[in-house]
Image: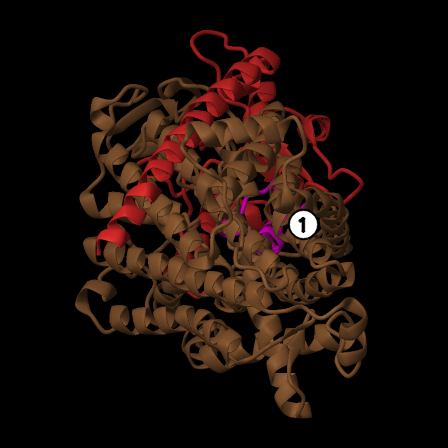
Chain colours: A brown, B red
């Protein structure tokens, strides 16, 4: 049974690569122009919206992006507060509190999808569709647009512009995300993911339930347009569940097949963007190097989570519980997991969702073994660059690539160079700012929360596990992941506001320096491929040597920043468990 | 300042019109089109995979229910509030692996199973004493089903082999040995026990 885990992992990684190659081709195409007749439709729609489509400098691009996201956040905020007055609210849900609505608006616009509310008892069908589904698309398109702009920065030589934000966001939404979502939503619906606009459904129980409050003879089931939201929730690495239990809920993720599809959908675009990057900069080996570095980090993380979860909980053995894997059961630590996913597909999902900045869960992360939870936490803290969010994973990893060549340049005493462009302090400033923003938010936020009465009030678990709940919340928010150690009662004004701030800064205080970097790079003269190959002979940025250097750079920055905090949380908890 | 203001205003129009355009396409047209197609192609699945009912609405085959009759298969523990298997309050315990409350809960569940089946000294399959992530898990492992077969046979006054055979008839095994888990749907199994087709 344990060979099953490794089979699943190997098949999954292979499938991701196989999807990445053709998808990379499509993405690279979209960086330049949409094919006809799509380009014609696109042009017509953009003109109707008053968009000229002219190239923007990085300031213009960033300004448009910020304004668009601000408008989206305001619209989502207002929509939630108005939901009792609007149609498609069969359960007649009231408006959420102002702080919850604010948190949710920021959360979905920043591609985080942290949820302080329970979907099936808070959001009307209209809010789920017109608010949350929309931002699932638009936040994903925004992330990919930034990656497009940065790719252009590398590819262009002495250029003033990095593209046009409006063109990018419309093109990505209509020609990439929408068709993929329709296909995936239908595949989900075929497997049993619900898709309707009904009110809650009451069904008879086979056996009446005797409770202190009397006999219960029926069961109420939440309904809604789930499949359509599920598809873009995964493809856009959003992760916000229609239901509270997210992808553990049988109506969101009913079979082993939907589960595999969901995991593949999470990694598809981040992996495809690596391939697209290689094509756009005219050297596909560069894209493979990034994908290889991501894969190495990912497989190492999965290995820890898989073995930890399969080994099970030592406390249970003494209670006469059988945790051994066999042909009849998955065994292992099944607290907070579903039988249809067992250990293998739950552990793999946990790694996928935290490596990519998705944040959907098919098992409760708070009930993972301490070291597994620690690895999930670290995957987010590395800056969401192991595949990462759509767009943000690629631009995050490229920041580390620049840092790696810069460090290597310092060590060898040569002018650092990446893809034929000299890397000077003007490039390194935005890189360093973008890399340092999130650790600052995570560590300061956690310190403030555990140091304040309002922060400590929300804890479910005591001691080190309680500290991990808070560290996890700020790591998830600032890195725009959205998963949670859900024991934390985060639907309070304190956490709603603090985490909203972390999400907003963790998103836009990274995007703006990245766009500045794209603008600077675009203006630089790019050396020819032949000149690049001879100049970078000492350190080619496509070989195994560079992959190792890149992996070490990511790990070094992450480890130096977070080891003390991780030691206080998951490590202490692990030692408590085994002693 | 005036130049900045005019740049802002000239950006505002595309911002609002692109937002409205994409909202209508992705927030209305897309979910409604998928709803229409799903209802057309897979009407039962789109509505919640409901079992044919004897009277009233039948159970969903995707959502578990709670059982405590010794003559029926018991589902996994569910910690949804206020009742287990509450279909509008999905969620797990979120207890850490080290939490004393988790150990106490598992010990109590083991004790309840032992009390209902005193002759059975086998170790208890882990999924039968741990709370699922959704609180709505419709399945138990094959190990958990066979563990309960003796108790069910005794309570119903039937041969244990017939209960084991029923489990085998409803067993679902991993595809190619690694996609999916060995499991059985508790709602289906209990309907079969009751003779409902």
The magenta stretch spans residue A87 = no
**Residue A275 on image: x %, y %:** 71, 54
**Residue A554 visible from this viewpoint:** yes
Using the rendered view, name the quadrant where residue B170 is placed.
top right
Residues rendered magenta in the picture: A329-350
Residue B19: image quadrant is: top left
Q: Residue at x 29, y 61 (%)?
A: A459
Write the residue at 75% across / 80% down: A539
Q: Nearer the viewer, residue A399 or B116?
A: A399
A134 sits to left or right of A497: right
The reply, left or right, for residue A498 in relation to residue B48 is left
User: Which residue, as the protein is rendered here, is positioned at the far top?
Assistant: B55
Q: How many marks?
A: 1
Chain of the residue under the numbered disc 1 shown in the image: A
The answer to whether one can see residue B69 in this image is: no
Describe the element under mark 1 as helix, strand or loop.
helix
């Amino acid at each position: 049974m344990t060979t099953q885990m490794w089979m699943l992992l190997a098949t999954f990684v292979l499938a991701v690569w196989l999807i990445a190659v053709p998808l990379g081709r499509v993405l690279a195409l979209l960086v330049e122009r949409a094919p006809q007749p799509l380009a014609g439709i696109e042009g017509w729609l953009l003109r109707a919206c008053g968009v000229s489509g002219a190239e923007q400098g990085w300031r213009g691009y960033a300004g448009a992006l910020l304004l668009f996201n601000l408008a989206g956040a305001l619209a989502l905020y207002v929509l939630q507060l108005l939901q009792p007055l609007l149609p498609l609210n069969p359960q007649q849900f009231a408006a959420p509190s102002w702080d919850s609505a604010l948190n949710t608006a920021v959360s979905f616009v920043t591609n985080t999808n942290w949820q302080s509310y329970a979907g099936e008892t808070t959001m009307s069908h209209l809010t789920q569709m017109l608010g949350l589904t929309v931002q699932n698309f638009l936040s994903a398109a925004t992330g990919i647009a930034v990656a497009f702009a940065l790719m252009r920065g590398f590819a262009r030589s002495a250029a003033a512009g990095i593209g046009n934000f409006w063109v990018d966001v419309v093109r990505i939404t209509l020609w990439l995300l929408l068709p993929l979502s329709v296909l995936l939503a239908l595949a989900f619906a075929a497997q049993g993911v619900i898709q309707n606009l009904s009110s809650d459904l009451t069904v008879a129980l086979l056996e009446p339930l005797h409770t202190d409050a009397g006999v219960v003879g029926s069961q109420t089931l939440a309904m809604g347009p789930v499949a359509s939201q599920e598809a873009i929730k995964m493809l856009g690495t959003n992760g916000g569940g229609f239901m509270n239990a997210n992808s553990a809920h049988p109506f969101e993720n009913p079979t082993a097949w939907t589960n595999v599809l969901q995991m593949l959908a999470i990694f598809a675009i981040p992996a495809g963007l690596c391939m697209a990057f290689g094509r756009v900069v005219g050297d596909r080996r560069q894209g493979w190097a990034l994908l290889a570095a991501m894969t190495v980090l990912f497989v190492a993380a999965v290995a820890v989570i898989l073995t930890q979860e399969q080994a099970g909980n030592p406390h249970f053995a003494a209670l006469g519980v059988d945790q051994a894997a066999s042909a009849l059961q998955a065994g292992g630590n099944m607290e907070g997991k579903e039988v249809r996913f067992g250990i293998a597909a739950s552990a793999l999902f946990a790694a996928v969702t935290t490596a990519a900045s998705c944040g959907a869960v098919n098992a409760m992360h708070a009930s993972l073994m301490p070291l597994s939870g620690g690895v999930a936490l670290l995957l987010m803290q590395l800056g969401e660059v192991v595949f990462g969010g759509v767009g943000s994973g690629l631009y995050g990893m490229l920041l580390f690539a620049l840092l790696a060549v810069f460090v290597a340049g310092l060590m060898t005493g040569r002018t650092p160079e990446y893809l034929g462009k000299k890397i000077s302090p003007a490039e390194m400033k935005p890189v360093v700012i973008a890399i340092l923003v999130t650790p600052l938010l995570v560590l300061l936020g956690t310190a403030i929360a555990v140091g304040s009465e309002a922060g400590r009030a929300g804890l479910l678990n005591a001691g080190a596990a309680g500290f991990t709940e808070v560290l996890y919340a700020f790591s998830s928010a600032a890195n725009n992941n959205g998963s949670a150690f859900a024991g934390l009662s985060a639907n309070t004004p304190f956490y709603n506001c603090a985490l909203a701030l972390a999400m907003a800064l963790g998103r836009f205080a990274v995007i703006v320096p990245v766009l500045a970097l794209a603008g600077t790079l675009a203006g630089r003269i790019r050396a020819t491929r032949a000149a690049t190959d001879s100049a970078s002979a000492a350190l080619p940025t496509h070989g195994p040597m560079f992959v190792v250097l890149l992996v070490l750079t990511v790990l070094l920055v992450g480890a130096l920043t977070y080891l003390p905090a991780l030691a206080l949380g998951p490590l202490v908890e692990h030692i408590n468990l085994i002693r | 300042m005036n130049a900045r203001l005019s740049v802002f205003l000239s950006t505002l129009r595309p911002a609002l019109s692109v937002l409205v355009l994409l909202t209508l396409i992705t927030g209305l047209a897309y979910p409604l089109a998928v709803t229409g197609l799903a209802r057309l192609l897979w009407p039962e699945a789109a509505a919640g995979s409901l079992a044919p009912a004897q009277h009233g609405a039948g159970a969903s085959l995707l959502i578990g229910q709670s059982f405590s009759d010794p003559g029926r298969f018991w589902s996994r523990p569910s910690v949804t509030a206020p009742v287990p298997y509450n279909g509008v309050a999905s969620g797990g315990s979120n207890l850490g692996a080290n939490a004393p409350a988790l150990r106490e809960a598992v010990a109590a569940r083991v004790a309840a199973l032992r009390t209902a089946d005193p002759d059975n000294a086998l170790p208890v399959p882990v999924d039968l004493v741990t709370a699922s992530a959704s609180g709505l898990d419709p399945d138990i492992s094959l190990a958990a089903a066979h563990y309960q077969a003796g108790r069910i046979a005794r309570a119903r006054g039937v041969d244990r082999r017939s209960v084991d055979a029923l489990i085998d008839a409803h067993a679902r095994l991993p595809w190619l040995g690694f996609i999916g888990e060995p499991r059985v749907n508790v709602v289906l199994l209990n309907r079969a026990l009751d003779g409902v087709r």
